[in-house]
Image (cartoon, grey):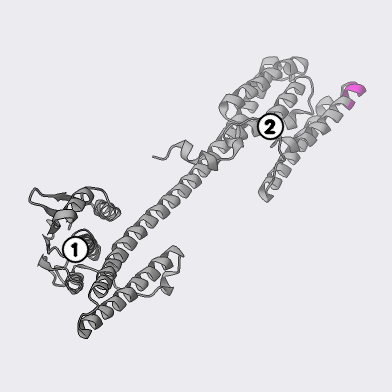
Amino acid sequence: MTSRMEYRWLLPSVLLGEGEEDRPVRRSTRDWIVDTCMFLAACGVTLLSAPDIAGEARGYIVVEQVLGVLSCAAVWLRRRRPVTLALVTSSLTSVLTLVGGASIVALFTVAVHRPFKIAGPVVAFGILTAIPYVHLRPDPLLGVWGSFLLMTTLILMIFAWGIVVRARRQLVLSLRARSSIAAEEARRLERERIAREMHDVLAHRISILSLHAGALEYSPGAPPEQIRRAASAIRASAHQALQDLREVIGVLRQVPEDARPERPQATLADLAPLVEESRQAGTEVALELAVPMSDEAAPPEVLGRNAYRVVQEALTNARKHAPGAPVTVRVSGAPGEGVTVEVSNPAPVAAHRRSMISEIPGTGTGLIGLAERAELAGGRLDHRLTPGGVFVLHAWLPWP
């Protein structure tokens, strides 16, 4: 489950309970509309409250009017300093009437933009300031405590409304943040998948190129026909490697799928050409395939492609670490039992053997990629060097 800290950076500071902001507030079009509505609401409440002070002294009425106008104008500061605005207007409402509209807007703003540990005490202070007001101007019908209960209910309703708005905003923002994290995770997994595919394909092609080029380098006096075959194999492998690389680059550049060249994915049916290609490169390969290949009983394409990549990487490793050693490839399986891939080859002798022993148990990039591929498919992969000096790569992939 995604924790809050993973997407905290995506949440505005006003929803995380940070202190009063001194920097200018950048309002969106929606913010301007909301602030205008809040300003008009504060002005409306102030105008509706004006008849309540009609019988007061003239000087008192002037003070009420001036502070009422200033408090309504101060509503535009509610985003920058909501707590300060709420405390000041709440204090004024203890003796004044026309500040009530701005006070209601300020308390609502605090409930929306500040956590309960800040908004709760501010609202409690607003309720306490109602006590002197109801003693100075009690409602003739409700009395002192009836008026206090009415004002307390009104303040709590405004506070509850603000909490609901805040909770909804936090929910929307957290869902957006989690969606962003999920999208980034999906991109990371896709990059890893492309890296595995790129390694499995290009390492195979380049290893074949290296073998044929090495044969030409160390056999300059070879018959023309042999040189021609080696040059043809180099050209074909280079062309195939370029096609594979072009496809990977197209994915990385997010080329639309309809603009990508259609290329069939390798499956178990392509094992024979893969083995033949390795034989032409000078590796003695024996293939034992015991998997139903008819159209009705053939394994799924994804399963076949994963098994193909395992064999391909195993052959590449054999060419790199045990050149000239015979390789045995066994692939068997059936629906409900899964597909088992086992590739074995004897380790080289002398200096090559010591190198082999030091390198094979390590976690090379290719073997790590194969293990990840098998785990993602729900299978497993392991490799070992037997006491008899035979390197064995074993993989099992589920086949429902």
Q: Secondary structure at mark 1?
A: loop
Q: On the rendered image, what quadrant is the N terminus found in? A: top left
Vertical comparison of 225 with 296: above or below: below
> What's the CA distance linking mark 2 and mark 1?
75 Å
- 327 relative to 264 in the view: left or right: left
The kind of residue on which mark 1 rests is Pro
Residue sitting nearer the eye, 258 or 365: 365
Q: Main secondary structure of the magenta part?
A: helix
Vertical comparison of 126 with 286: above or below: above
The kind of residue on which mark 2 rests is Pro
Residue 394 appears in the rendering: no
The magenta stretch spans residue 179: no
The residue most toward the right is 58
Q: On the rendered image, what quadrant is the C terminus found in? A: bottom left
Image coordinates for residue 163, horizontal then vertical, percent: 57, 33
- 115 relative to 71 in the view: left or right: left
Residue sitting nearer the eye, 53 or 42: 42
Vertical comparison of 52 with 1: above or below: above
Image coordinates for residue 240, horizontal then vertical, percent: 32, 74
Residue 55 appears in the rendering: yes
Mark 2 surroundings within 10 Å by alpha-carbon count, few (fewer than 14), some (14 through 19), many (20 or more): many
**Span shown in magenta:** 57-62
Tell me which corner region of the image, top left, top right, bottom left or bottom right, holds residue 250: bottom left
| Residue under numbered circle 1 | 323
Identify the residue at image location x=22%, y=61%.
303
Identify the residue at image location x=58%, y=36%.
15
- 365 relative to 112 in the view: left or right: left
Give whichever of discs 2 and 1 has the lower sequence position: 2
Vertical comparison of 138 with 1: above or below: above
Identify the residue at image location x=77%, y=18%.
137
| Residue under numbered circle 2 | 82
